[in-house]
């Protein structure tokens, strides 16, 4: 299985791609830039979905569904929004095919041309705010707290499985509020949910902050984000939460009668995470042996492999294995007992290792005699022989340990690859040769940000929230700065 | 809430539409034929989804995700498939917009024309079988049992909320098998799942059978279906399960090496249910007071409304209400306690009645004194005063009763509206004046089926499975027939 699999050192990009393909997570399709998410990959996405869905519902949000198509004219209504998305839109122009004149192929029926073209949604602010106009009249109708699980399309020129694909799956929250304060509070509440999910479920430590104006969402007043550091020293944006001010309410004329009986524009937020999280999850923990998954998101948390020569041995082992399986399942742990006789134990070991199953139990004839089981953990690749008694509690405890370990390993990595830098030469050197997060002063201008990007490819990933202000001088221009910001090369 | 709401008798179509709109289930959008599914409607769909998803997984199926776009050329590969879908396809021809020359609007960028157009999937057989070719080499790779939850687009000319919309949500299963028998077994297994779900969860009795060649899925060898009868005497197809033979395997060249070391084409099935089920659910049970929902699919199963004048009374009532809520929730029952002071009890009563909440509890000062609660059931509109003791068990039992009652009421309706008919005059009379299912002999020819349709608008809804053969003469031609089939006008 892991043959011809390069190490991270040898070829990081290939290493990532091989994990995605060979661990059966996803693959490219016949449609340019669109992926097929395979069952094992999709099972991880389902765990991400169900966890986040519960977090959204626990904070008062409801799911709904809006059309995949957006009339072209809606797009132009918010000026910066159209500028941000117009260049990467799939456009539906016709609604019928017909057989060609020679009868040999099918072609687009020119008689079925749409009067107004539809855009396949790259995000749904416009169609949703066009709908909210009908739903919101009074302060009694607020807040509207809605989330949608959907597919979206952005015509990307360079795609990479999960990280950047033409079609991707995501959730997009769209909320409407009576006051600016409440909308900002919502934006921050969601950022916290995203950060909690990334750290406690994915085991990926993230920086929380806001984006510079240059990196803001098209149509937002302020974009909040969570940023993670990958093992190649590049940053990955894992989620964004936008305070939209009254921009979309004004563009779509959504007003409400306030408690004070005044007609006012509604305040808005939008926020989303996508299948890109799968990319972060894979890159954050995996190693040169393949995928490593945090137990909380692993479709199979424990695999049990029988080791036997004779069929009578298998029967005895199966009895023990199925008892363990049942005991673990009673604790809510997902277990696969792989007693297929078409594959040898060694093959199975590397298969599950490559696929990142957190814990592997192996049971052989000697284990039967000794009432033991061999326990192997994927994160450290350590093995030990444990007594069968209370094996369910031991495994449960081990899964918790692995979950924590992965987070702390990623956190150490980030700490070791975060550099506080005060000179331009050092900045360039670290960005070029070491990578990682670079904390440096910046004068706050888009011009400087762009020059730094042109010279080093590094961008401002985030302006940290709740940091103590520390005066300093811009790394590039020497102009005064009130706070360090986080630079990195990014996915 | 229920003002200007017509009875079924007065205007059945308007009655249906008003329930969908006024019970906040869905509404039309700015995009032709596409609906917005509102939170209350979507919550029902989520229950449908999670129940079916579990049933699929319990029978060995896994979820995956395939691209929304299908290259035009894929479409032509299976001849009858393209014929079935070509006339109702949304076609993507361009991938970029640009600002118009006068700078005032945006337009499609003609420089960004696709070499080959993409179709927005109306169903995914083609893209999936193109993928399976890479996945399947040997009998060891079979069966492939995959399901996808997705949106699809069919450019319908006449649309009705949930029943027929340009975009709809659905699940589509696509399985691959080594033998014909196994594929047919799968087709039937899924039909059984659909029937069980319709009857036990939705409370909608369904006929199981196969479609006549004329009504078969484009590309199928045999289409199995479940058909339900609505209150206006029209049939509604609720789900289909297709045995595809080797049609798609041949079109996409998917072969496997059998156990006998022979290269053979793979056998296939596909099957789906959609948001159309919402239409069936609404029409099957609702009455002239609004929506009626079966408890198993109701987002809110029990609502508790406090009745009070003074705020101290509310406090006392709330204490009791919250205890009941907790006790019911411990039994897995979803409960809403509506203590809003912005609406009066009477308003709330009609609101929840219209929205089909199965059980309503009302608690007033006298109930506090007597340790009672008023219990109202939505299906029969009956009310009674019950002692508070064991109220959780009583309500749990009542919900079960309501679930059964709805099924049996719908079953009686179907029985009363199923007619065994032997003469053409009687056939025409019943189809035109009574509606319902008509069991009649048919000579088996498409020609006859079409003539009957032309003259009466009735189609063959299904050829029942497992019926005893009973010889007879075709209602239309008098030619011999071996079995009665089910005719009806249909949605």
Image (cartoon, coloured by chain):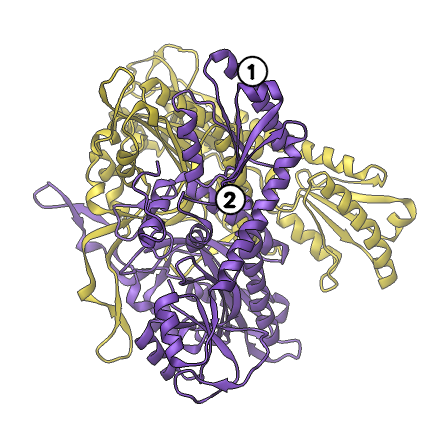
Chain colours: A purple, B yellow
The relative height of residue A155 versus residue B258 in the rendered view (above or below) is below
Q: Disc number at residue A259?
A: none
Residue B490 seen in the current view: no
Residue in front for this viewpoint, A470 or B84: A470
Q: Position of residue B185 (x, y in %)?
A: 40, 20
Total numbered circles: 2
Question: Which corner quadrant holds the C terminus of chain B?
Answer: top left
Within 10 Å of disc 1 (Cα), the crowding (few <14, some 14-19, many 20+) is some
Q: Which of the 4 image quarters holds residue B239?
A: top left
Q: Position of residue B221 (x, y in %)?
A: 29, 25
Q: Which residue corresponds to the image point at 32% horizontal and 47% vertical from the top-left?
A: A6
Q: What residue is shown with label 2?
A: A380
Residue in front for this viewpoint, A306 or A381: A381
The relative height of residue B400 versus residue B469 in the rendered view (above or below) is below
| Left or right relative to A115: residue A195 | right
Q: Which residue corresponds to the image point at 32% horizontal and 19% vertical from the top-left?
A: B179
Q: Are marks 1 and 2 in contact (CB under 8 Å)?
A: no
Q: What residue is shown with label 1?
A: A316
Residue A232 seen in the current view: yes
Question: Which corner quadrant holds the N terminus of chain B?
Answer: bottom right
Q: Which of the 4 image quarters holds residue A77?
A: bottom left
């Amino acid at each position: 299985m892991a043959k011809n699999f390069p190490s991270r050192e040898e070829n990081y990009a290939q290493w990532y791609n091989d994990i995605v393909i060979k661990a059966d997570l996803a693959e490219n399709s016949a449609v340019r830039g669109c992926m097929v998410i395979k069952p094992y990959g999709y099972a991880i996405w389902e765990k991400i979905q169900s966890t986040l869905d519960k977090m959204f519902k626990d904070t008062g949000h409801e799911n709904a569904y809006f059309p995949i198509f957006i009339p072209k004219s809606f797009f132009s209504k918010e000026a910066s929004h159209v500028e941000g998305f117009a260049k990467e839109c799939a456009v539906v122009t016709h609604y019928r095919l017909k057989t060609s004149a020679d009868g040999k192929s099918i072609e687009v029926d020119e008689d079925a041309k749409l009067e107004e073209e539809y855009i396949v949604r790259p995000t749904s602010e416009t169609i949703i705010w066009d709908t909210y106009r009908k739903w919101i009249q009074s302060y009694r109708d607020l807040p509207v707290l809605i989330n949608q699980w959907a597919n979206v399309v952005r015509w990307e020129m360079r795609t990479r499985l999960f990280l950047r694909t033409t079609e991707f799956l995501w959730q997009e929250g769209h909320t409407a509020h009576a006051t600016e304060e409440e909308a900002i509070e919502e934006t921050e509440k969601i950022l916290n949910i995203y950060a909690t999910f990334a750290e406690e479920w994915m085991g990926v430590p993230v920086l929380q902050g806001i984006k510079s104006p240059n990196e803001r969402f098209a149509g937002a007043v302020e974009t909040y984000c969570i940023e993670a550091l990958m093992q190649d020293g590049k940053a990955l944006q894992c989620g964004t939460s936008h305070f939209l001010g009254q921009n979309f309410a004004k563009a779509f004329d959504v007003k409400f009668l306030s408690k004070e009986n005044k007609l006012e524009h509604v305040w808005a937020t939008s926020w989303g995470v996508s299948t890109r999280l799968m990319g972060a999850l894979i890159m954050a923990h995996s190693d040169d042996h393949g995928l490593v998954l945090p137990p909380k998101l692993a479709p199979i948390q424990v695999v049990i492999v029988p080791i036997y020569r004779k069929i009578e041995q298998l029967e005895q082992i199966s009895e023990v294995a199925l008892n363990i399986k049942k005991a673990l399942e009673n604790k809510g742990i997902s277990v696969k007992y792989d007693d297929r006789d078409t594959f040898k134990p060694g093959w199975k070991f590397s298969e599950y290792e490559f696929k990142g199953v957190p814990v592997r139990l192996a049971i052989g004839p000697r284990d039967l005699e000794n009432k033991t089981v061999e326990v192997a953990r994927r994160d450290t690749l350590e093995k030990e022989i444990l007594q069968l008694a209370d094996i369910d509690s031991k495994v449960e405890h081990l899964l918790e340990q692995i979950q924590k370990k992965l987070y702390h390993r990623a956190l150490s990595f980030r700490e070791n690859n975060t550099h506080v830098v005060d000179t331009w030469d050092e900045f360039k050197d670290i960005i070029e040769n070491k990578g990682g997060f670079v904390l440096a002063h910046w004068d706050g201008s888009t011009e400087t940000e762009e020059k730094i990007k042109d010279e080093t490819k590094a961008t401002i990933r985030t302006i940290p929230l709740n940091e103590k202000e520390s005066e300093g001088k811009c790394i590039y221009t020497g102009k005064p700065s009130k706070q360090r910001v986080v630079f990195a090369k990014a996915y």
